[in-house]
Image (cartoon, grey):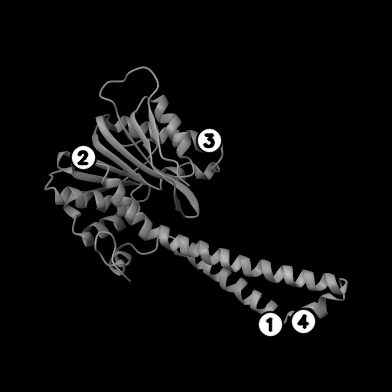
């Protein structure tokens, strides 16, 4: 299946991490197949369909109706196939590539003693951090935090398969109230996770927005002064930037737009200042569509 940027075979990466939400993929492929068959039926039996519709519409209107319906079903099949392809790409290859980009934001991993992956999931980003710690000979460790104990056990399995288990610790916990002390981590990272917090209230609800802001506040609380945070997420990046400005974070940067799971996403990096200084913070934006 080819090599990744890190010269690894995609089959090996898929074997380790698999497809996370295969039910969604099956749903998309099933409906794409259904609409493909339906559009082919409209094409093959077009005259018969028009004859049937003649009893409901005028002759010209029946052909227009049949042609329009067939075109819509064909377009629906194409859109669903595209969505399925984007989902497959976003679920593993894109997350793997973005993890490499995120870890490259840290200039020297040998100086990192404690790192946190918020919402570690399968461990793609978590293991990328652990790999950097291993490469640089660091004595540091990365903690993966997730809401599910079952997920953390699965993540430890992927860390073992990647050969970095000695650098990884996984914990179950509530991301809105992190079970760590103030100024604890040198680096905090998170990959397509923060937008899921509070989704039970509805993505656009005030309650969900408040919970996402609470998570950002917790990230700022647990990172050390001078520590770096790298957050890749969907949909709500502008509100993250506003909140980080309010919290007076340093060196706030926003990456170019990357389409993930059929939505726009950006990487936000920022640094916790050694001393808080009053006044607005500069934001470096790269909003390329």
Nearest the viewer among 245 and 157 is: 245
Indicate which disc, 4 or 2, sits on the residue closer to the N terminus.
Answer: 4
* Image-quadrant location for residue 282: top left
The answer to whether any part of residue 150 appears in the image is: no
Q: Position of residue 138 (x, y in %)?
A: 13, 45
Q: For the residue labelled by badge 2, is the local secondary structure a helix, a strand or a loop?
A: strand
Q: Position of residue 286 (x, y in %)?
A: 41, 40
Image quadrant where one finds the N terminus: bottom left
**Mark 3 and 4 residues: CB-CB less than 8 Å, in contact?**
no
Helix, strand or loop under label 3:
helix
Find the distance from the CA under tag 3 to the CA under tag 4.
Answer: 54 Å
Q: Position of residue 207 (x, y in %)?
A: 53, 35
Task: Please tell me which of labels 2 and 3 falls first in the chain.
Answer: 2
Q: CA distance from mark 2 to mark 1?
A: 63 Å
Classify 165 as above or below 11: above
Q: Is residue 137 left or right of residue 276?
A: left
Quadrant hosting residue 79: bottom right
Q: Earlier in the sequence, mark 2 or mark 1?
A: 1
Q: Residues within 10 Å of mark 4 (few under 14, many from 20)?
A: few
Q: Are marks 2 and 3 in contact (CB under 8 Å)?
A: no
* Secondary structure state at the residue bearing disc 4: helix
Local SS, label 1 = helix
Of badges 3 and 4, nearer the viewer stands 4
Along the line of sight, the residue nearer the viewer: 200 or 262: 262
């Amino acid at each position: 299946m080819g090599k990744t940027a890190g010269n690894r075979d995609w089959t090996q990466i898929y074997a380790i991490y698999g497809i996370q939400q295969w039910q969604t993929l099956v749903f998309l492929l099933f409906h794409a197949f259904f609409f493909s068959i339906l559009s082919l039926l409209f094409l093959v039996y077009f005259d018969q369909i028009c004859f049937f519709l003649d009893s409901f519409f005028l002759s010209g209107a029946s052909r227009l109706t049949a042609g329009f319906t067939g075109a819509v079903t064909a377009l629906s099949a194409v859109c669903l196939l595209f969505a399925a392809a984007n989902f497959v790409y976003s679920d593993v290859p894109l997350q793997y590539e973005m993890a490499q980009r995120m870890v490259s934001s840290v200039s020297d991993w040998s100086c990192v003693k404690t790192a946190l992956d918020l919402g570690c999931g399968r461990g793609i980003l978590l293991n990328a951090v652990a790999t950097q710690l291993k490469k640089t000979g660091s004595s540091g460790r990365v903690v993966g935090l997730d809401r599910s104990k079952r997920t953390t056990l699965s993540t430890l399995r992927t860390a073992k398969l990647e050969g970095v288990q000695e650098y990884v610790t996984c914990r179950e916990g509530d991301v809105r109230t992190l079970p760590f002390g103030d100024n604890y981590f040198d680096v905090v990272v998170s990959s397509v996770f923060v937008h899921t917090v509070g989704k039970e209230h509805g993505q656009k609800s005030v309650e969900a927005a408040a919970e996402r802001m609470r998570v950002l506040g917790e990230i700022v609380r647990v990172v050390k002064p001078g520590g770096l945070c790298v957050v890749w997420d969907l949909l709500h990046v502008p509100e993250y930037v506003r909140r980080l400005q309010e919290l007076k974070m340093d060196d706030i940067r926003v990456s170019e737009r990357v389409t993930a799971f059929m939505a726009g996403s950006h990487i936000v990096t920022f640094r916790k200042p050694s001393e808080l200084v009053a006044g607005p913070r500069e934001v470096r934006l790269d909003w390329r569509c």
